[in-house]
Amino acid sequence: MTAGKGGDIELAGLSKSFDGSTYVVEGVNLKIPDGAYCCFLGPSGCGKTTILRMVAGHEDPTSGEIVIGGENVVGLPPLARRTAMMFQSYALFPHLSVRDNIAFALRVRGMSKQERYAKADEMMDKVQLGELADRLPAQLSGGQQQRVALARAAITEPRVLLLDEPLSALDEQLRIQMRQELRRMQRQLGITFIHVTHTQLEAIALADLVVVMEKGRIKQTGPARDVYASPKDRYVAEFLGGQNLIRGRVQTVNGHHAVVTAADLRGIEVPLTAAPRVAVGDDIAVAVRRDDIELVRPGGAPLPAGVTSIASRVLAIEYQGYFLKVMLDTMEGGEFIAYVPERKFYGDPFEVGDVVLATWAVEHARILT
Amino acid sequence: MTAGVATPMGSRTATRSRAIAPRSSGRPWTFYVLATVFVLYVAALYGPMICIYVLSFQDVRGGLVFPMKGLSLHWFVDLFTQVRTGDVQGSFDRSIKLAILVTIITVVVSFLAGMGFRRRFRGDSIVFYLMIGSLVAPGLVLGIGTGLLFNLLGIEAHWYTAAIGAQLSWTLPFGVLVMFAVMSRFDRAWEEAARDLGATRAQTIWLVVIPILSPGIVAVALFGFTLSYDEFARTLQTAGSLNTLPLEIWSMTLNVTSPSLYALGTVTTLISFLIIGACLGAISLIQKRRAATLGGVPR
């Protein structure tokens, strides 16, 4: 299977409305390079699956263009687009054996039985399904079903493979295993994958390009690390998790830093960046990664320069294996959590009710839009 | 099944409620009460039919009521040799042909209706109730109406004209209801997957939809066949001059006063069971053959 030439995708002003008044997808612009693994991430109902179905040709956009390999494919059937879709829960044909499922696309093209079985067997070897060729889908495990679905889609030699929540039908352990298999298949086939998921861990583990969506719009696009470590706004920060959000008002701005205060918060210092610009009196949100928080006992050595702190009380502690999740009552209404490495925590363990200082380097705080 | 329900409850309340969970014997008294009710229910269901079958095996002295006189196949022989018992052979032929025609129409129309009703459309519930409505209409009246309508149209009522129409008003609603139940478990993703893989509409229906729905389609066919084969009320005024089997049996009850009438009942029941058995046998044969071609051992 050669690398699908021209598997780059461009969505331009893509919108979709089912009833003519509310838009499930609204003005989406996106470029996905050829051979990329792209994940659409968002809660259910955010329009990510609708975008996938429009790219696949199972849904027509209300307006906008879908360009694959330089050609607008709106209105073309899936086969002409050279896309293939892997359905949520796989939609394997229950009355056909594994071999017949995989050979289905060749059968409807009128290929002879001998020829299409030869090709299907070749594909089955590639995904290690050889000994299951004569089984029916109901006799396969979830992971095996996924491999059959993948093989069935890949045999059409698509330039883009579209995966709708491909791991949601699997249990936790298998999910992590199949995640790796998806990535391996993508490298092996060398084609563009678009994968829709509502699980942020899945998206950041797999994707070259993460697209975070909310209510039919794209909130942020970028490599996994950018999206996770540098969320642009509160929505992305909250959806991807791992961040503490502090809301407050800008009290002073001096060159490189601003000081933010709130009702239950003494001034904390945050670094200024080119964007977004803030002025005195603005209400803003600040994000600090949970693993950037260090907990110290009050009354110890004075904090070094360039470190901010908030005094608080330990609300709850959860053991997570290699780290501990310590919940603090820093702010009313909002949660504030520190991830403390396991060994470090047990060096001087905290109890629920202890008063602690949550500290972090000023440079680690980020202002959100 | 009573015991299964009572046990977890009994273990909790054993000290208080002796009635539900006796300590020594295995089953609570409720089991015996419900078992008796069930036996009576089965007896009421099958007893009358069994009376007919038993009485049909009397010898030449036999009458229409108990007690049973002797044991022979005399009345079965009588059934096929005596002219006075009526046109059993002819009416049986007509009934089978009529049932086959009705079955084919029922299957095709129910399948199409099932396909059509997967998507909501304007006025769909009105169309649905119009389809189901004829179930509540009294069959005899509907039969008379159908006969009148054919008369008005100038078509002579025969088993192959007006009777088909009248019977369809009975078999179609059932067929459609069964088809809807079958369709509700059909995942549209299968069709989309077929389209995604390049299948045309016709290929999708032929290679995916029909094979997946085939057990349901067989069920609709069985329904259509058995409902038509013993339909009486609607056929009475629409079959014209030549009787179907149920009509023939009815007319025989008026003028045949021998157990050969019962023999006829036994034979027709046997044929019904043979047809149903053949259908079920065919289904299980297909499934066995399918399983046999599977190489691997099911896990």
Image (tube, coloured by chain):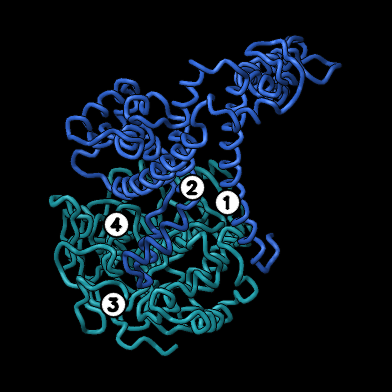
* Viewer-proximal residue among A144 and A239: A144
* Viewer-proximal residue among A136 and A152: A136
Q: Earlier in the sequence, mark 2 or mark 1?
A: 2
Checking the image for residue B218, the label placed there is 2
What distance separates the C-alpha of mark 1 from that of mark 3? Answer: 40 Å
Q: Position of residue A367 (x, y in %)?
A: 27, 62
Crowd band around label 1 with a 10 angstrom C-alpha radius: few (<14), some (14–19), many (20+)? some
Question: Is the same chain shared between marks 2 and 4?
Answer: no
Residue appearing at x 56%, y 42% in the figure: B275
**Labels 2, 4: front one:** 2
* Viewer-proximal residue among B265 and A257: B265
Q: Position of residue A29 (x, y in %)?
A: 20, 70
Question: Is the same chain shared between marks 2 and 1?
Answer: yes
What distance separates the C-alpha of mark 2 from that of mark 3? Answer: 38 Å
Name the secondary structure under disc 3. helix
- Residue underneath mark 1: B283
Identify whether B248 is placed above or below B213: above
Q: Position of residue A224 (x, y in %)?
A: 39, 71
Checking the image for residue A104, the label placed there is none
Q: Position of residue A24 (x, y in %)?
A: 22, 55
Residue appearing at x 56%, y 67% in the figure: A97
Crowd band around label 4 with a 10 angstrom C-alpha radius: few (<14), some (14–19), many (20+)? some
Name the secondary structure under disc 1. helix
Residue appearing at x 62%, y 48% in the figure: B281
Task: Give amino acid for label 4.
Answer: Arg
Task: Give amino acid for label 3.
Answer: Arg
What distance separates the C-alpha of mark 2 from that of mark 1? Answer: 9 Å
**Labels 3, 4: front one:** 3
Task: Give amino acid for label 2.
Answer: Val
